[in-house]
Structures are given as structure tokens and as C-alpha cells.
Image (cartoon, rainbow, N blue to C red):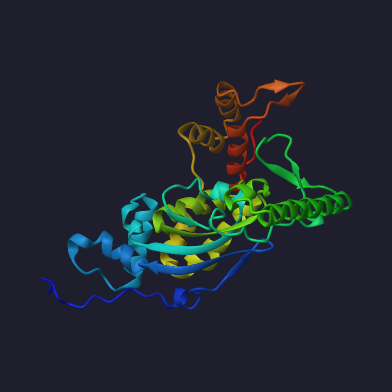
């Protein structure tokens, strides 16, 4: 039995210690940096093997166990690791970020302090077009000549809003009210502490190609520059089983089985029963489930049967 007075050493990860406090730039004036952390891959293994006492020291066995936990969605051991970030992020992006509620948050307060004098700016070649077939997404970019004008107007708006804000403060208006017309492009800062399980869920959604560019930029930095160094075995498993994997519904599996058997008629019949192949003026009606399935089978090297 372990001696209750036995010294327990804090788990350290040298690769993460090297970047502790380092600011990783994001967007034009944002950043992410690690303030503190607890746990490592070893902590996950230790938690998973708690009923067996001290875990194995063999990296290959630890890797296998972590991959098993990730593959079978045994999430509790990943909650043994926590990390605290200091982030600087535009307020509109922060609105999306804060929807991930399973975390501890303390944000810069513009009731007590003067708002950060920085707003996210958009380069002339970075104005995105609204996607025609996706109400919440973008597709392509405006012509740079138009973008130049929009960027100039953006700067005018931001400067004017800031001027009005300062004017209110000079007249003695309370900070809590003076701030109300600041644009959502204004940067805010926060401390964000989260366990590894919930962080990976955040990354699985926000690293996705369908996520908005701004928050995806933060997620990619957190994942590739920080989590990959903190828990490399977990990161490898996460990429394999979540980010780069493909999942299929039972109906999709039936269609794939039909394609493997070269039974195109059966595959089409199943798709028709799902309403995937409805047409207007000889064009398929947009169906997100069908489109996502087509993307999946393309990755498998299969051709669309319709």
C-alpha cells in the first residue's frame, strides 16, 4: 500500500513548459498563450488504471491504452488534465467561443476598465462572400478592388465608434454605458480554463472546415501548437479517431455495400427513399445529408452512383 506521506511530484511536460506564457499570434492582433496546466498523457493513463495501482511506464502500452480510450469514447480519464489559457479575441468570435459552456471563464470587464483600444481589421482580399446554399457560411471572396473600399469604410467606422466612446468617457459617462456602441470587432481578453475532454470537443467543432475562419484560426493554434506538445499521444489519437476519421450511418453503410457489390440500382433506390434525389428543373434539390455522404465516398475513392 502506498505510504500516505510519500511525496507526490507535480507532472511536468518539458515541451509545454518551453512555451508557457509564450503568445501565439492569431488574426491581426489576437493571441493565445498557456498560463498553467495540470496533467499529461501519463495522468490519463494513471486515471484509467487506478484500480491496478501505478500504471505502466512503457510508452507503447500507454499509447495503446489512450488510443483505446479515444476509440471507444471513454472520456473520463481525459478530464484528469486541465489547462488555462490567456486569450485575446474579437468580441464577435468570443460570442461563438463562450457557447462552449463546460469551462471556467474570467473576461476583461469594460464596466471597470477602459475597452481595449484594438479592433480586428479585414484586409482588402479577405472579404468573404455569402454562400448561396448555406445561410451560415461563406464561399469565396469579393474582388480586391471592392474589398479595398470596404476596408477603408471599416476603418472609418471603427475610428468613429472609438472617438464617440472616448468622448463619452471625457464627459464622465459611466464606463458600463459608454461602451454600448463599440463594434463587435473590438478585442477582449479572457482567462479560459478547461479540461482536456471538453477542450477536444471544442477543437473537433472549431477546427472543422465548416467552422468560421476566425474561431478556426484560434482552434488550429490551440490544437497544433499547444495540445500537440502537451499530450502528444492523446493528440495523435484525437487526429486519427475524430478529426481525420469518417463515420457512417446504418443507411450509408447499406448504400456503400450496394456500391461494393456493383448494385447501383439498389444504391439509387435507397437514396430515393431518403429523399436525397429530389429534383427541380433537372437539378438535385440541395440535401446536406446527401452532400456529406458524397464527400465521404469521394474520400474512399468511390464514385457517386447518381
> Horizontal and vertical percent for residue 292?
59, 38
In the picture as drawn, the residue positioned furthest to the right comes out as 145
Nearer to me, 148 or 217: 148
> Horizontal and vertical percent for residue 130?
74, 40
Report whether 295 appears left or right of 34. Answer: right
Answer above or below: position of 15 versus 261: below
* Residue under the point 45% across and 55% down: 105
Answer above or below: position of 219 versus 96: below
* Residue under the point 77% across and 52% down: 160
Place residue 196 in its image quadrant. Answer: bottom left
Report whether 271 appears left or right of 79. Answer: right
> Horizontal and vertical percent for residue 99?
50, 45
Report whether 253 appears left or right of 58. Answer: right
Quarter of the rendering occupied by the N terminus = bottom left
> Horizontal and vertical percent for residue 252?
51, 34
* Residue under the point 48% across and 63% down: 85
In the picture as drawn, the residue positioned furthest to the front comes out as 171
Place residue 278 in its image quadrant. Answer: top right
Amino acid at each position: 500500500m502506498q505510504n500516505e506521506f510519500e511525496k507526490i511530484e507535480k507532472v511536468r511536460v518539458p515541451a509545454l513548459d518551453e512555451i508557457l506564457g509564450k503568445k501565439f499570434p492569431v488574426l491581426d492582433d489576437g493571441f493565445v498563450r498557456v498560463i498553467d496546466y495540470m496533467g499529461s498523457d501519463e495522468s490519463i493513463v494513471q486515471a484509467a488504471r487506478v484500480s491496478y495501482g501505478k500504471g505502466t511506464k512503457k510508452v507503447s502500452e500507454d499509447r495503446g491504452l489512450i488510443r483505446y480510450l479515444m476509440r471507444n469514447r471513454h472520456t473520463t480519464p481525459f478530464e484528469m488534465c486541465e489547462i488555462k489559457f490567456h486569450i485575446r479575441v474579437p468580441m464577435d468570435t468570443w460570442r461563438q467561443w463562450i457557447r462552449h459552456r463546460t469551462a471556467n471563464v474570467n473576461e476583461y470587464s469594460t464596466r471597470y476598465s477602459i475597452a481595449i483600444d484594438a479592433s480586428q481589421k479585414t484586409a482588402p482580399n479577405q472579404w468573404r462572400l455569402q454562400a448561396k446554399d448555406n445561410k451560415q457560411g461563406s464561399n469565396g471572396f469579393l474582388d480586391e478592388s471592392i474589398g479595398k473600399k470596404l476596408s477603408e469604410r471599416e476603418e472609418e467606422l471603427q475610428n468613429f465608434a472609438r472617438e464617440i466612446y472616448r468622448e463619452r468617457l471625457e464627459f464622465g459617462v459611466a464606463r458600463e454605458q459608454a461602451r454600448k456602441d463599440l463594434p463587435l470587432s473590438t478585442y477582449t481578453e479572457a482567462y479560459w480554463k478547461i479540461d482536456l475532454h471538453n477542450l477536444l470537443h471544442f477543437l473537433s467543432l472549431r477546427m472543422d472546415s465548416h467552422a468560421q475562419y476566425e474561431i478556426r484560426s484560434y482552434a488550429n493554434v490551440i490544437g497544433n501548437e499547444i495540445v500537440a506538445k502537451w499530450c502528444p499521444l492523446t493528440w495523435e489519437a484525437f487526429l486519427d479517431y475524430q478529426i481525420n476519421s469518417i463515420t457512417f450511418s446504418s443507411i450509408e453503410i447499406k448504400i456503400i455495400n450496394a456500391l461494393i457489390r456493383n448494385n447501383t440500382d439498389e444504391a439509387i433506390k435507397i437514396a430515393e427513399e431518403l429523399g436525397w434525389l429530389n429534383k427541380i428543373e433537372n437539378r438535385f434539390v440541395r440535401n446536406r445529408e446527401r452532400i456529406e455522404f458524397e464527400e465521404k465516398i469521394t474520400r474512399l475513392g468511390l464514385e457517386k452512383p447518381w
